[in-house]
Image (cartoon, rainbow, N blue to C red):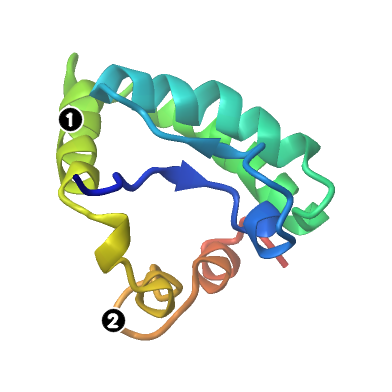
Amino acid sequence: NTRQAGLGCKHCSEKDQGAPGRSFPSQPDNMASSLNTSLYHHFQRCQFVPPEIKRALSNLKKLHSVQCSNLKFGSQRRYFNLVFERLRKISVDDFDPKAAQNIGGPSGATFEDSLVSLGFMN
């Protein structure tokens, strides 16, 4: 019986605020809904998320709407199915938080570095 990985606000979890910004989707469609609504709204309201991250997320949400209009029908569903399957394979017991901080890629860039390089943050 392993504990399943989910999605969450690192800013709240670093402050030990319980679990207000966490989601453990049971289906791929739930993951898409969770990211697009509840987690996005949490990040915008969370007192621990820096203002520049909130602005970047707002800009990315607008860009996402434009990008989705150019996708083939079903592309986003296939993407979330792939992400969901990968997430389901991760056991919380095997999770390495230090490895997760390097989500920007092999160059060692952080997520925030990536947003700055793409012009979404200063």
> Does dot 2 land on a helix, a strand or a loop?
loop
Compare residues 59 and 89 and report the one nearer the observer.
89
Q: Quadrant of the C terminus?
A: bottom right
Q: Is residue 86 above or below residue 75?
A: below
Q: Which residue is mark 1?
A: 81
Judge from the rendering whether residue 48 lies leftward or rightward of residue 66; answer left or right: right
Q: Position of residue 18 (x, y in %)?
A: 68, 46
**Which amino acid type corresponds to the residue marked 2 in the rendered image?**
Pro
Q: Is residue 94 above or below residue 107?
A: above
Q: Is residue 113 above or below residue 6?
A: below
In the image, what residue occupies the spot 34% across and 85% down? 107
Q: Is residue 54 above or below residue 91?
A: above
Label 1 vs label 2, nearer the camera: 1
In the image, what residue occupies the spot 60% across and 68% down? 116
**Outermost residue, bottom side:** 107
> Does dot 1 land on a helix, a strand or a loop?
helix
Give the tally of numbered discs: 2
Q: Position of residue 97 (x, y in %)?
A: 42, 72
